Amino acid sequence: MASPTAAPALRAEHLTKHFGRTHAVEDLTLEVAAGEVFGFLGPNGAGKSTTIRVLLGLLRPTAGTAWVFDAPAADVERAHRYLAHVPADVALWPSFTGQECLDLLAGVGPGTDLVYRAELVERFGLDPGKRARAYSTGNRQKVALVAAFATRAPLLVLDEPTSGLDPLMEREFRRCIAEATGRGQTVFLSSHQLAEVEAVCTRVGILRAGRLVEVAGLAELRRLRRSEVAVELARPQPALDALAGLPGVADVRWTSPLELTLALTGPPGPVLRALGDADVVRLDVREPSLEEIFLDYYGQAAA
Ligand SMILES: Nc1ncnc2c1ncn2[C@@H]1O[C@H](COP(=O)(O)OP(=O)(O)OP(=O)(O)O)[C@@H](O)[C@H]1O
């Protein structure tokens, strides 16, 4: 679905939410462009759900403002015409069947593609005749996901939507994200599953103690972080000890007389020039995974 206005799908300016002395969200400024899949990451208690609840108009910010396309987030009636939402803890009406829940959710949302919804019920292996009280956590999550993906809402806000899904369903979820972006929908995804974020998101924002500490594309994040370089030589090269003095190089380690590893930040030119004269038989450069990038941020938090 094309975006309804030229405005970004989500915009927060100096968004702040305090609960008494707890500063859950502090001065958060962020824009998510229409058509993006944006990953919203952070450790437990970082403020992700609070931010989402403010964006959904479920909480009033202490300060700052937020918009969903051209609608102020606080104008719930307008903002919710643009979005579908999957909460972290899906609560359904216990005496309704899955089908009845789906129909009810379709009635309050911005319009549903019923043919696609029936396809998703199949793909997620959902038994729509069962009463919601008998659903497992994962199955409740599937009902909410099917309801959200089947809408043509230009913005999907998903708060840890796959925490209860098994790997097969996780794969289905990733297909649904691809299909949603294919239709031009924007996705705002809060998740602890870093492999999932790595697979589906174009940009990520990292939240720590209520503050946005980084917003970047995945490629950009990797460039900022250290790559691991492994070198295998045909014969010993003691001169390569000098690698340790090159810009961006750290942790030079000989793992055997013919093998060394090092960590590299920034352009590889100086290292490549130094290796040019050595008899290199193998060179591996491994970019950090999102998980490693993350652990770096968490590590700093603990320091
Ligand atoms: N209604 C509330 N009253 C008081 N404190 C709250 C309330 N809701 C959240 N908090 C606090 O605000 C902070 C941020 O919580 P939030 O649930 O937004 O984090 P989160 O990043 O979503 O965490 P998680 O990954 O564990 O879901 C926490 O310190 C939490 O205890």
Image (tube, rainbow, N blue to C red):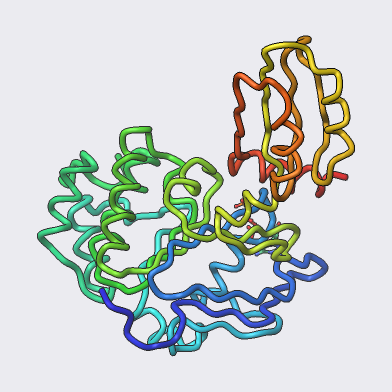
- Residue drawn 72% across and 64% down? 210
- Residue 9 in percent (x, y) is at 44, 77
Q: Residue at x 23, y 62 (%)?
A: 150
Is 82 or 126 nearer to us in this picture? 82
In this picture, is 9 found above or below 268? Answer: below
Where does residue 171 sit, x and y in percent of width and height? 33, 39
- As displayed, is residue 288 above or below residue 206? above
Q: In the displayed structure, would residue 234 be above or below residue 82?
A: above
| 48 or 297: nearer the viewer | 297
Q: Identify which residue, 3 or 164, lies in the foreground.
A: 3
Residue 293 x %, y %: 67, 44
The residue at the point 88 percent across, 31 percent down is: 242
Locate the N terminus by quadrant.
bottom left
Residue 27 is situated, as x and y percent measured from the top left of the image, at 73, 76
Residue drawn at (13%, 53%) of the image: 118
Badge count: 0
Quarter of image, ligand 1: bottom right
Residue placed furthest toward the front = 277
Q: Which of the image's four quarters has the C terminus? A: top right
| Residue 209 falls left or right of residue 181 | right
What is the residue that sits farthest to the left in this orientation?
Answer: 115
